[in-house]
Structures are given as C-alpha cells and as structure tokens.
Image (cartoon, grey):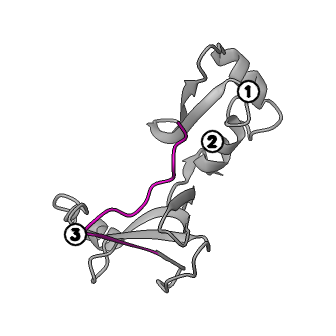
Amino acid sequence: MSEEPPRRFPFVTIKVVDKVGDILPVNTPGELCVRGYNVFKGYYEDMERTKEAIDSDNWYHTGDICTMDEEGYVSVISRLKDMIIRGGENIYPVEIEDFFLKHPSVDDVHVVGVPDDRMGEEVCACFRIKKDHQVTEEELKEYCKGKVSSLFA
C-alpha cells in the first residue's frame, strides 16, 4: 500500500503563499497557511509569538515550504523557520535530513536543535531504520565525515 501525500480536509482552508502573502500558482513552492477549526488559538500568554504565527485574518503560517497540486494534495519540501545556531554556525535541519535519507539503512530522520550551555544549541537527529537493517551511531557518524559541516567531527 503506497502512501499518498496529505490533502486538505473538510472545513479547513489551506493556501500556499509567497514571502508577502500572495497566493502562488499550483505546484509552486511557498509557505503553507492553514485556517479552520483545527488551528490553535495562539501561544499561551504570549501574544507576540501568536501575532508572528497567526495573521489578522486568522491564517496560521506553518513555516512549512510546500507545493499543492491541482487536486489539493500537499507535499512538504522544506521548512522556512527552522535553523539551528550551534556555536555561531547556522545549520538547516532539512539539509541534514535530506543527506541522511540517502543512507541505505535510514527510513526516516528528523533533526532538531536542543539547548546546550556551551554551544547555545546542539543538533539532535532521531532516526527510523529500515526494517531488516542495522546501523550503529558510529557508522552514521562515519557516513557524515567530510560531507556534513563539523557536526560529527
């Protein structure tokens, strides 16, 4: 059974917009915006962050870069807001994820920043390994050497 990309569901409106909020043509990458009953009302006791995420017309700006096809199927291709700052180095999780997804044993990976007293943030990668495959942390680190920043040096 193959998985289809997500599609808009009833009573929820979605759009893909450019940097100034104009709706983009079908199959054009832009930021996914969502409006409907499923959108949270805002950040608890944090109006500033709420205003950054939800505009005056109640569109939630997800920070996901996606395309939407003619039938309303959405494919997320990147993230607008994610960036890890590790010791002054800007690291984009999607670039690391794309790299690891080429490894023959990696089925899925998600990269996030976690607080670190010395570096400000550190990179945390969570892997799902393919069924009937095995890979060690050391093998994944070796796979990175000379190819991905200085993350795993």
> Is 49 in front, or is 130?
130
* Residue 93, above or below 33: above
Q: Earlier in the sequence, mark 2 or mark 3?
A: 3
The residue singled out by tag 3 in the image is 47
Between residue 88 and residue 131, name the one nearer to us.
131
Q: Is residue 5 magenta?
A: yes
- Residue 11 covered by magenta stretch: yes
Q: CA distance from mark 2 to mark 3?
A: 32 Å
Q: Amino acid at mark 1?
A: Pro
What range is drawn magenta here? 1-15
Q: What's the amino acid at mark 3?
A: Met
Q: Which mark is residue 104?
A: 1
When asked about the image quadrant of residue 138, the answer is top right
Camera-near label (3 vs 1) is: 1
Q: Residue 22: horizontal and vertical position, in percent?
A: 49, 86
Mark 2 vs mark 1: in front: 1
Say which mark, if any, is on residue 61.
none
**Image coords of residue 79 (percent x, y):** 54, 58
Kind of residue at disc 2: Glu
Residue shown at 52%/43% (left/top)?
3
* Residue found 73% across the figure and 30% down from its top: 103
| Quadrant position of the C terminus in the picture | top right
Q: Residues within 10 Å of mark 1 (few under 14, many from 20)?
A: few
Q: Is 93 drawn above or below residue 65 in the view shown?
A: above
Mark seen at residue 97: 2
Q: Are marks 2 and 3 in contact (CB under 8 Å)?
A: no
